[in-house]
Image (spheres, rainbow, N blue to C red):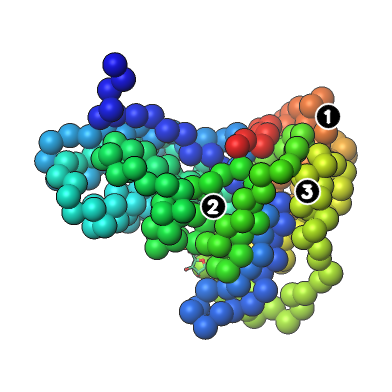
Amino acid sequence: MRDKSQLAISAPAKLNLYLHVKGLMHNGYHELETVMQTVSLFDELRIREFAGTEIKLITGNSEGLPPAEENLVVKAAKLLKYHYPRVKTGVEIRLKKNIPPGTGLGGGSSDAAAALKGISKIWGLEMQKPELAELAAELGSDIPFFIYGGAAICRGRGELVEPLPDIQENFICVLALPPIHVSTAEVYSEFDCLTNKSSLVNIAEVVSSLKFGDTKMLGDNLFNNLRQAACNVSTRLAEVEETMDKFFSLSGAYGYNISGSGSAWFGVYSERESALQAVKNFKEQANIPACIVHPVF
Ligand code: C5P
C-alpha cells in the first residue's frame, strides 16, 4: 500500500507570454492582465508528516532564498494549520531548487502552490482547487495560478485565474538565464515613474495563437510592459538586451521577451534544431546559462 504520510511533488516554472500592467490600484498592488504558461523547469518538493507540531524546511542550496521562516513553503504550511486547527502533526519539507530565484519564473510561488497541494493531501484535508487557490491568494499574487497550472489568463493583481483548457500549444522555448537577481517590488515602483508605458496590445492574439498552436503568431505577439521598468532597475539586465536580440534573432526565434519582472528571457521556436543551436550559442558565445523548455499541464 502507498505510504500516505509522505509524497514527492514537482513545482514548474512559468512564463508570462503576455503581461499588461494597467496601473496602480487602491490596495497598493497593480492591476494586470497576463497570460501565463507553466513550463518544464521544476523545483522538487518531498513532504513527510511526523509526530509533533513543527514545520521543518530543508533546502540543499539556499543561495538567494529567504530565511526558512520567510519562505513561502513554510508560510503555506502555517496557513493550512491556521485554517485547519484539527491538524495535530508536523511536516518536513525538503526543497530542491532548480528554478533560479529573482528571475520572473515564479519559482517561490510555484513552490508555495505545490506545498499547499501536497501538505493538504498529507493532512487529509481533501481541498479542491478553488479552495486551495483562495488560500494561495493570501500568500502571493501568482500562487493561485500555480494551483491550476497549464495556460491561464490572470487578472486583478494576478490572483483571478481563468484557465485556458481548450488549447493545443506546440511551441518550444529557449530560456536564457543571465545570473541577475531583480526585485519585483522595485520594478513595479519604477513602472509607476515611467511616463510612456502604454502601447497597442491584444491579448486575443496570444490566446488564439495558443488555441491553434500557431507559434509564429505567438512569437509576434509576446508582450511585457514591465520590460522597460525592469531594464531601468537593473543596468545589468539592460546590458544583456542587445545580446538577447542578437542570439534570439539569429537562431530564428519567432519572438522573445523577459518573463515577469525579469531577469529570465525566453524565445519561442517551432523547430527543435534551432532551439538547440540557440542554447549552444548562449552558452558558448555569451557565457549565459540556457536550456530548452516546453509547456506542461
Ligand atoms: O503578491 P506578491 O507578494 O508576489 O508581490 C510582490 C510585490 O510585487 C508586491 O509587494 C508588490 O510590490 C508588487 N506587485 C504589484 N502588483 C501586482 C503584483 C505584485 O505591485 N499585481
Location of the C terminus (image quadrant): top right
Location of the N terminus (image quadrant): top left
Please report the residue visible at 77 percent of the width from the left and 78 percent of the height from the top. Answer: 196
Amino acid type of the residue tagged 2 in the rendering: Phe
- SS at mark 1? loop
Instruction: State the residue in front, 98 or 53.
Output: 53
Say which residue label 3 marks.
Answer: 256
Please report the residue visible at 55 percent of the width from the left and 62 percent of the height from the top. Answer: 160
Quarter-wise, where is residue 135 in the image?
A: bottom left
Q: Which of pointers 2 and 3 indicates the residue nearer the eye?
A: 2
Please report the residue visible at 52 percent of the width from the left and 83 percent of the height from the top. Answer: 26
Q: Is residue 266 left or right of residue 52?
A: right
What is the CA distance from the residue labelled 2 to the residue labelled 1? 28 Å
* Image disc number at residue 271: 1
Amino acid type of the residue tagged 1 in the rendering: Glu
Quarter-wise, where is residue 262 in the image?
A: bottom right
Instruction: Return the disc, 1 or 3, that comes first in the chain's sequence.
Output: 3
Instruction: State the residue in front, 14 or 290.
Output: 14
Say which residue label 2 marks.
Answer: 145
